[in-house]
């Protein structure tokens, strides 16, 4: 028996993927800020400013009212506790050692927050029903027994919630935990990273947890950053790095979002100055002029580098075709980058108001030599 569909719409409409309503409500942030929840990975050598910069990111979240609880996993908290002063960090409950079960403890904390949230709203539902009955006393469907209203009022208090009935914003920060049990393959770290948006289920969607990782080495013979973390990172921060091999690996793993040439050019521009770093927003908002920033508060846009222009034209486009370099091309790019680094060449500054000289796009070595950046201050909260 043959069933004939009465749907005469074109195939592009009949089989289109539709985004269905539901799920957790997104955490609102300023237009120029990052999406929450996030997975942030900061890679820098020792004494580069990782802990300082990432703790300042927490202070920014706190000032905009988008931080309710910090969970810190660190073996060096006593030496760095001044960075966390003024943050919603409970030293007794939420400062953890980098043990094998650190990720499990974090997930239990978030699950408990979800339980308290769910319980509060169930109690509020009951409380409102009691208020309705009291308000209808003497009427049909109301309370009638003498003295019952007063008795109920004495024993029923309005439920309270420490976050005012909203889902809390929880951030867990792993500071210098590489080569510890917390990063062991036997731990639940990778599982938590993959599921971070779905931890803490409630009837109104999950609470979720944002994750921050500050590490010294992107890869290493032992104790490197797990691929599950690297693959789920939404905010990548890369500081100055003299290890070109490691930079090449980072650039290669970002190749689904940005080509190697572009990565090397913007990294060089962003890391000028002490404690400066490149931020790549891999889950940026459509309103952002670029996926690149110097630190948190300065956009990096391009005037003459076509690859950056393509990435900044429309946020969220399918980038499955933007990286058309073959493996041979990438090897040439890396060799060019190594040569440029050894020679000390740096991209020239370009006046953002001026148009590229020559009328057309630059390619290859010209592209790197002429790479410029337009500085635009992000008007959002800064430290």
Image (cartoon, helix red, strand yellow):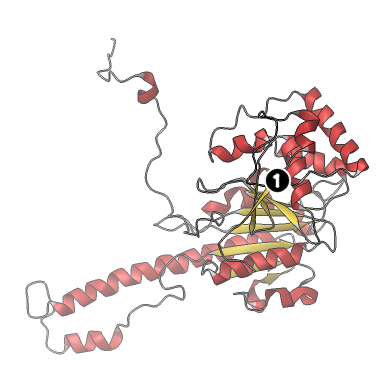
Image position, residue 157 (x, y; %): 32, 83
Image position, residue 87 (x, y; %): 62, 75
Q: Is residue 299 visible?
A: yes
Residue 199's place in the image compared with 67, above or below, is: above
Residue 84's place in the image compared with 307, above or below, is: below
Question: Helix or strand or loop: what does disc 1 sit on?
Answer: helix
Find the residue positioned furthest to the left.
Answer: 139
Residue at image location 64% in from the left, 64% down from the top: 57
Question: What quarter of the picture does the C terminus occupy?
Answer: bottom right
How many labels were placed on the picture? 1
Find the residue positioned furthest to the top.
Answer: 1
- Of 8 and 143, nearer the camera is 8
Q: Residues within 10 Å of mark 1 (few under 14, many from 20)?
A: some
- Of 55 and 144, nearer the camera is 55
Horizontal placement of 353 versus 285: left or right? right
Horizontal placement of 348 versus 102: left or right? right
Question: What quarter of the picture does the N terminus occupy?
Answer: top left
Residue 24's place in the image compared with 169, above or below, is: above
Find the residue positioned furthest to the right.
Answer: 342
Image position, residue 334 (x, y; %): 83, 33
Horizontal placement of 353 versus 168: left or right? right
Q: Quadrant of residue 174?
A: bottom right
Q: Is residue 98 visible?
A: no
Mark 1 lies on residue: 230
Residue at image location 22% in from the left, 77% down from the top: 131
Residue at image location 70% in from the left, 45% down from the top: 230
Residue 180's place in the image compared with 65, above or below, is: above
Image position, residue 100 (x, y; %): 74, 59
């Amino acid at each position: 028996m043959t069933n004939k569909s009465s749907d005469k719409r074109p195939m592009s409409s009949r089989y289109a993927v539709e985004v269905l309503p539901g799920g957790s409500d997104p955490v609102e942030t300023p237009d120029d800020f990052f999406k929450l929840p996030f997975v942030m990975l900061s890679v820098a050598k020792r004494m580069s400013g990782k802990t300082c910069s990432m703790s300042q990111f927490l202070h920014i979240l706190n000032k905009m009212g988008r931080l309710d609880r910090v969970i810190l996993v660190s073996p060096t908290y006593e030496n760095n506790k001044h960075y966390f002063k003024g943050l919603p960090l409970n030293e007794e409950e939420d400062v953890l050692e980098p043990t094998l079960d650190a990720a499990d403890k974090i997930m239990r904390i978030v699950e408990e927050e979800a339980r308290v949230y769910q319980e509060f709203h169930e109690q509020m539902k009951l409380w409102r029903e009691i208020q309705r009955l009291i308000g209808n006393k003497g009427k049909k469907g109301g309370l009638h027994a003498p003295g019952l209203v007063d008795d109920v009022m004495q024993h029923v208090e309005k439920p309270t919630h420490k976050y005012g009935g909203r889902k809390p914003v929880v951030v867990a920060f792993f500071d210098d935990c590489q080569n510890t049990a917390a990063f062991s393959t036997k731990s639940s770290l990778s599982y938590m990273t993959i599921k971070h948006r779905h931890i803490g289920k409630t009837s109104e969607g999950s609470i979720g947890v944002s994750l921050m990782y500050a590490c010294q080495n992107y890869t290493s013979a032992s104790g490197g950053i797990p691929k599950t973390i690297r693959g789920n990172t939404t905010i990548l921060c890369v500081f100055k790095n003299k290890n070109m091999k490691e930079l090449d690996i980072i650039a290669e793993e970002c190749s689904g979002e940005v080509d190697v040439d572009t990565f090397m050019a913007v990294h060089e521009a962003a890391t000028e100055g002490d404690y400066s770093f490149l931020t790549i927003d891999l889950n940026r908002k459509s309103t952002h002029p670029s996926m690149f920033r110097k630190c948190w508060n300065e956009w990096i846009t391009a005037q003459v580098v076509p690859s950056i222009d393509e990435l900044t034209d429309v946020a969220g486009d399918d980038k499955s075709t933007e990286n058309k370099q073959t493996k041979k091309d990438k090897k040439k790019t890396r060799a060019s980058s190594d040569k440029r680094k050894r020679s000390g060449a740096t991209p020239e500054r370009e006046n953002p108001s001026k148009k590229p000289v020559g009328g057309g796009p630059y390619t290859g070595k010209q592209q790197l030599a002429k790479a410029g950046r337009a500085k635009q201050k992000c008007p959002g909260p800064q430290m």
